[in-house]
Image: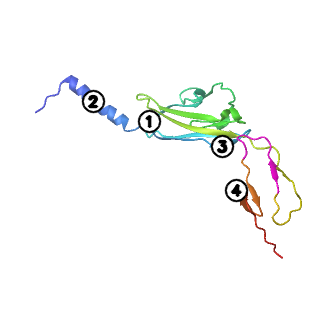
Amino acid sequence: TATLTKDSEINFFNYTTLSEIEGFCLRELKIFVPEAVIMGNAATLSCQYDLEQAALYSVRWYFEGEEFYRYVPKESPPARVFPVSGISVDLSSSDSTSVTLRSVTRDLSGQFLCEVSEDAPLFHTEIRISHMQVVELPTEEPFMLIDKKVLGSNDSFKASCTVGKSYPSANITWYINDRKVYKTPFQRIVYRSLN
């Protein structure tokens, strides 16, 4: 028959308590950041997680290593914004799982990080990172110029297409009679009359 001392009872009690606590903790942290956002539009970043029976301690958002938003439910108010150049947080649309940025600029293309921590006693923390690209669309329609208005059989011609300022640079794809033109030195286009 085993005999338990006072000290061994305490050690056994602590061990089982920690095992039960570790069974319920932060799991399945996922970050959702738009891959591309049009400059001037709002962008909503989301961090979804499962705390099981653990309590939330904090959610922190960083851009390129700088913290710009923090949510701590035990504080009043729970949401705080930190000054980071180019970032304007819409507090009315932000909470413990998401943060909304107003009127994003090209400077906000980069890495966003979400850090979620559970409350005492473990303070288990998980981090996820994702990239967002802010795009600037051309403000004008493409302009096309062709050097010949009338073409005969086997004639060659030169065409140019100009697109307004954009970021990243716009891709231009050419079509002749609904057929894609591929980038080769010469391409023969056969046109059959419907008559």
Kindly give the residue lying farthest to the top in the view shown. 7
Alpha carbon separation for disc pair 1 and 3: 34 Å
Res 182 label: 4
Q: Judge from the rendering whether residue 49 lies leftward or rightward of residue 99; answer left or right.
A: left
Location of residue 69 by image quarter:
top right
* Among numbered discs 1 and 4, the one appearing first in the sequence: 1
Position of the C terminus, as image quadrant, is: bottom right
Which residue in the protein does label 2 denote?
13
Residue situated in front as seen by the camera: 115 or 77: 115
Dot 2: what SS? helix
Q: How crowded is mark 2: few (under 14 residues within 10 Å), some or many (20 or more)?
A: few
Which residue in the protein does label 1 denote?
54
Position of the N terminus, as image quadrant, is: top left
Alpha carbon separation for disc pair 3 and 4: 27 Å
Residue 27: x and y, percent? 45, 40
* Among numbered discs 3 and 2, the one appearing first in the sequence: 2
